Amino acid sequence: MNYVARIALVVAYSVLGLAALGRSTVQITTKLADAPVPYLVSGLSALLYTVIALALWKRWAGVALVGTVVELAGVVIVGTLGYVEPSWWPDETVWTGYGSAYGWVPLLLPIIALVLLVRERTAHATRTARKDPS
């Protein structure tokens, strides 16, 4: 992955992590009893975004790959459940409505990150195979 793409992803994940942390901190500390599942999901997403940002920064490709898969699954599951069973989501999370409150960035970002990470992994495997003629 080129330097600019990696930095852009680190910045995007860091911003989302801070936004989700702020949102979930307020929600959890002031009104957790009102909607515990959505507020804890927001807290979990904040943690996940932070881990992904750190993994991308440190070039821990495996951690970043797993994190983005978990993130994409979370966005799709929470987004779908929000429409199928709205009573489970009395308040929004970062992933509610597939991240619509955040301009669908929570849905698009892991897809972009996964494409870049898989391309990088494939390119690395190809380079390694070319070096090892056996």
Image: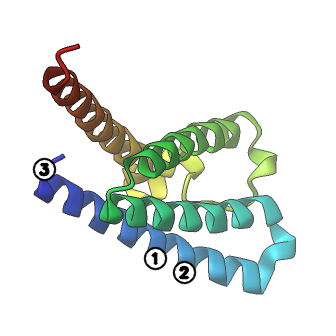
Residue at point 59%, 51% (across, down): 96
101 shown above or below 66:
below
SS category of the residue bearing label 1: helix
The residue beneath circle 1 is 18
Q: Amino acid at mark 1?
A: Leu
Residue at point 56%, 52% (across, down): 95
The reply, left or right, for residue 67 in relation to residue 93 is left
The reply, left or right, for residue 16 in relation to residue 70 is left
The CA distance from mark 3 to mark 1 is: 24 Å
Q: How many marks?
A: 3
- Confirm or deny contact between disc 2 and disc 1 (CB under 8 A): yes
**Percent position of residue 72, x then y:** 50, 41
**Percent position of residue 127, x then y:** 16, 29
10 shown above or below 117:
below
Residue at point 49%, 63% (across, down): 51
Q: Amino acid at mark 2?
A: Gly
Dot 3 or dot 1: first in sequence order is 3
Q: Could you say which disc has been placed on residue 22 in the image?
A: 2
Q: For residue 93, what is the image quadrant?
A: bottom right
Task: Say few, some or many: other residues with alpha carbon within 10 Å of mark 2 (under 14 / 14 to 19 / 20 or more).
Answer: some
Dot 2 or dot 3: first in sequence order is 3
Q: For residue 91, what is the image quadrant?
A: bottom right
The residue beneath circle 3 is 2
From the viewer's side, name the closer residue of 126 and 93: 126
Judged by depth in the image, the label closer to the viewer, 2 or 3, is: 3
**Percent position of residue 36, x then y:** 81, 65
Task: Say few, some or many: other residues with alpha carbon within 10 Å of mark 1 (under 14 / 14 to 19 / 20 or more).
Answer: some
Q: Amino acid at mark 3?
A: Asn
